[in-house]
Amino acid sequence: MQRLCDAIMVFNGKVACCEQLSVEDVLATYQHQHKLSSVIEKAGFFSLLDGASTVDKARLLAISAPQAHAWLRAQPSPKLGLDLLPNEVQALVKCFADFCRRACLAPELERGCGLTSTKDRTRPADVLVPNWSLSRSAAFDLKVINPLNSNFLLGASMTSGYTAELGEKDKHSKNDIPCTERGWVCVPLVVEVFGGWGNEAQEALSRVAKKLAIRTSRFWPEVLASMYCHLGITLMHQNARALLGRRSTSEVDNCLV
């Protein structure tokens, strides 16, 4: 009993008051090790967050967003389609469209709003998927956003997913009217540069994964995890290309030595 009391004392010293346990709690209900570890890790994260600068807070919250770390779980396996060849250059839009195609959703790439005879740069749809909701087509529009941007930094340092939510609102403000005029529904696909996806993107990806799981006779969570891995690797690959593209040739050579 003394060992139990000592263990509870150590645990309570590491977690918030609302998460603390008593001897009675432990004896009355079986405590899973995973749950207890998660509580300690959560407390450690917020402790780290409290002592961080504004920039570091924004970065920590961004990388802790749902699925922000999916690319780290991706195994470089050709059988899983996750191998990165030297000449592989894929865009997130094409990656998402491919998932829709495999789910037999008949996606179309880059649809302009069609309000003028000349090429329209507003493009309310990077990917258009017919019959998405109540016989209306879904106009998916991708946006990659940086939570460390000075315009978003303060909010991003306080709330995980803050920047992605702003990105979704921005897409709606620009695309809702053109989409409505075409009989479409606007669905923003917003992802932060650290890999965290906006709520609407997560809902859309989950829906595509369910359809793809049925088509391929696989478990839905497995398909969804694989999709996030593909998208995460593509995002990080494109981030690296963009970073190297802004450096001089001599700087790149020095990095590769």
Image (cartoon, grey):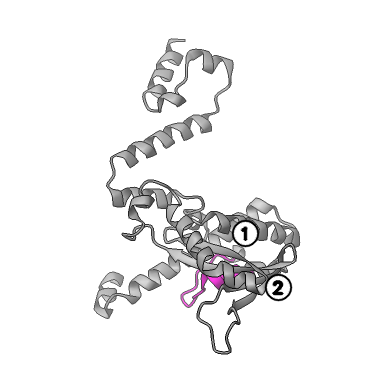
Residue drawn where x is 40% and y is 34% of the image = 43
Q: Which residue is mark 1?
A: 204
Q: Quarter-wise, where is residue 194 in the image? A: bottom left
Residue drawn where x is 28% and y is 40% of the image = 51
Q: Quarter-wise, where is residue 14 in the image? A: top left
Residue 252 pos. (x, y %):
29, 74
Task: Examine the residues drawn in magenta and state their main secondary structure.
Answer: loop
Residue 180 pos. (x, y %):
63, 69
Closer to us: 174 or 41 = 174
Residue drawn where x is 64% and y is 57% of the image = 223
Residue drawn where x is 73% and y is 69% of the image = 104
Q: Which residues are magenta?
A: 81-98
Q: Quarter-wise, where is residue 40 in the image? A: top left
Q: Residues within 10 Å of mark 2 (few under 14, many from 20)?
A: some
Numbered mark located on residue 160 in the image: none
Q: Secondary structure at mark 1?
A: helix
Residue 174 pos. (x, y %):
51, 69
Residue 228 appears in the rendering:
yes
Instruction: Determine whether, in the image, residue 31 is placed left or right of residue 39.
Output: right
Residue 89 lies in the magenta stretch: yes
Numbered mark located on residue 106 in the image: 2
The tag earlier along the polypeptide, 1 or 2, is 2
